[in-house]
Image (cartoon, rainbow, N blue to C red):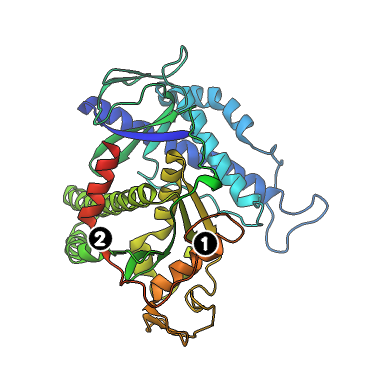
């Protein structure tokens, strides 16, 4: 199992210049290598015995570029451009590996027949990270000793270790990245003692979760969590800062200062959202052994008129975090098809048509509950078919009303469990 621990760096002003220079040189190398690949693609688009109807490059057709040919040309690059001699060679190779992965995602479809977007040329500042693939090994370019990170050709940088690296974890690689508030290092840690997943026969507590925009999620036992709306709350402040940015002369010192303020606001919102996702994920994993969630087409939903609210709650990021936390704790998660869960009655199974404006499920069998609660119960029943799991039956109208779980209670439950 691989975990990522991120720590803030405290580099000197000279080291900051070196880090920024590396990012700019790697950006230029990315653009050159991508240009080679695109040029080869244009020259080989038509067969050799015919020409394109629009235009066709003339001249000798170069060999097909790939990672190995472009990595072998690094020696020639250093001879032509001596500045690249100051960059650790593994970082340049990792830069080419990133390009190779992006290129293959674009041209080669995955198992579902989907492909990624076309790799783009990077603007100034777009490449703000580089990776040392080996740490604390004899030929590694990065060595961590205590709270000091020694990087090849950069020097020793103080690391603010706000939490200790667990014993028995092996540091596989280190990625240096720039954010709006400074430089950080992300360590990829390998934990070989992966906890075994809980057997189905030993599952005691189960739930289904229905995510939404009115409430962040609702569980099958009627508990719900409100939507924090971090981006919505920061919109007015962000709008003022962006208006100030628009009035500055592009590229000036004042423009750069104001652009940093805008970036800091976005970073603060992203960190708030991520912390909230972890709080909810830990609360769910602490409370239940099996969590059934809905496999939503979030990319399709984000194209609707509710796109801003959907992207603000970030269901996809939350579900990834929840599954990662569950695996780390040995708990189970299961994704099911969400179609019909909001319409079908969780008690009798009858189909009750309703629009999005109707927030209460009222069935002829006498069941009157919240729409999201009914959906969570259907998700739990759908994910528990054929499994010897207790507590997966329907719901009658005598069930008590659901309760609201506050964000403060989530924080307490997480830190109590982790202490």
Q: Earlier in the sequence, mark 2 or mark 1?
A: 2
* On screen, residue 310 above or below 27: below
Is there any visible trace of residue 336 in the rendered image? no
Is there CB contact under 8 Å for labels 2 and 1?
no
The picture quadrant where one finds residue 326 is: top left
| Residue in the picture at 17% in, 62% down | 237
SS of the residue under disc 2: helix
Name the mark on residue 230: 2
* In-image side of 106 versus 325 (left or right): right
Instruction: Please name whichever residue, 96 or 393, is drawn nearer the observer in this view of the structure.
Output: 393
The residue at which mark 1 appears reads as 295
Residue 95 picture location, percent across and down: 49, 34
Counting the numbered discs, the total is 2
Binning the other alpha carbons within 10 Å of mark 1 as few (below 14), some (14 to 19) or many (20 upward) gives: some
Residue 388 picture location, percent across and down: 57, 54
* On screen, residue 339 above or below 366: above
* On screen, residue 320 above or below 1: below
* In-image side of 326 versus 163 (left or right): right
* On screen, residue 35 above or below 309: above
Is there any visible trace of residue 200 in the rendered image? yes
Q: Quadrant of the C terminus?
A: top left
Looking at the image, the residue that sits furthest to the front is 398
Instruction: Please name whichever residue, 238 or 417, is drawn nearer the observer in this view of the structure.
Output: 417
């Amino acid at each position: 199992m691989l975990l990522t621990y991120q720590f803030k760096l405290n580099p000197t002003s000279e080291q900051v210049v070196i880090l920024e220079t590396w990012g700019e040189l790697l950006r230029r190398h990315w653009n050159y290598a991508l240009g080679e690949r695109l040029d080869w693609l244009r020259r080989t688009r038509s067969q050799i015995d015919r020409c394109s109807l629009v235009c066709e490059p003339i001249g000798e057709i170069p060999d097909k570029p790939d990672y190995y040919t472009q990595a072998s040309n690094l020696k020639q690059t250093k001879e032509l451009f001596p500045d690249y001699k100051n960059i650790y060679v593994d970082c340049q190779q990792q830069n080419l590996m990133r390009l190779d992965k992006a290129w293959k995602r674009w041209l080669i479809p995955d198992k579902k027949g989907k492909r990624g977007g076309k790799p783009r040329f990077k603007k100034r500042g777009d490449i703000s990270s580089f990776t040392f693939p080996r740490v604390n090994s004899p030929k590694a370019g990065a060595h961590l000793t205590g709270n000091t990170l020694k990087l090849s050709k950069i020097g020793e940088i103080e690391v603010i270790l706000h939490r200790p690296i667990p014993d028995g974890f092996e540091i596989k690689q280190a990625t240096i990245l720039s954010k709006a508030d400074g430089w950080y290092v992300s360590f990829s840690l390998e934990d070989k003692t992966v906890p075994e997943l809980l057997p189905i026969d030993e599952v005691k507590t189960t739930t289904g979760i229905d995510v939404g925009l009115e409430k962040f999620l609702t569980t099958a036992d009627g508990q719900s969590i409100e939507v924090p709306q971090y981006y919505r709350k920061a919109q007015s402040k962000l709008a003022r800062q962006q208006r100030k940015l628009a009035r500055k002369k592009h590229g000036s010192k004042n423009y750069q200062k104001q652009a940093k303020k805008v970036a800091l606001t976005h970073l603060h919102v992203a960190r708030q959202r991520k912390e909230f996702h972890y709080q909810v994920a830990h609360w769910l994993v602490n409370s239940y052994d099996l969590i059934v969630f809905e496999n939503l087409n979030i990319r399709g939903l984000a194209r609707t008129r509710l796109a801003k609210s959907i992207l603000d709650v970030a269901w996809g990021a939350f579900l990834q975090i929840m599954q990662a936390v569950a695996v780390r704790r040995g708990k189970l998660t299961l994704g099911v098809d969400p179609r019909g869960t909001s319409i079908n009655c969780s008690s009798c199974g009858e189909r009750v048509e309703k629009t999005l404006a109707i927030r209460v499920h009222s069935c002829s069998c006498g069941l009157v509950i919240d729409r999201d609660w009914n959906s969570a119960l259907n998700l739990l029943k759908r994910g528990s078919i054929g499994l010897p799991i207790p507590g997966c039956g329907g719901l009658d109208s005598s069930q008590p009303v659901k309760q609201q779980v506050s964000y403060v209670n989530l924080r307490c439950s997480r830190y109590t469990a982790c202490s």
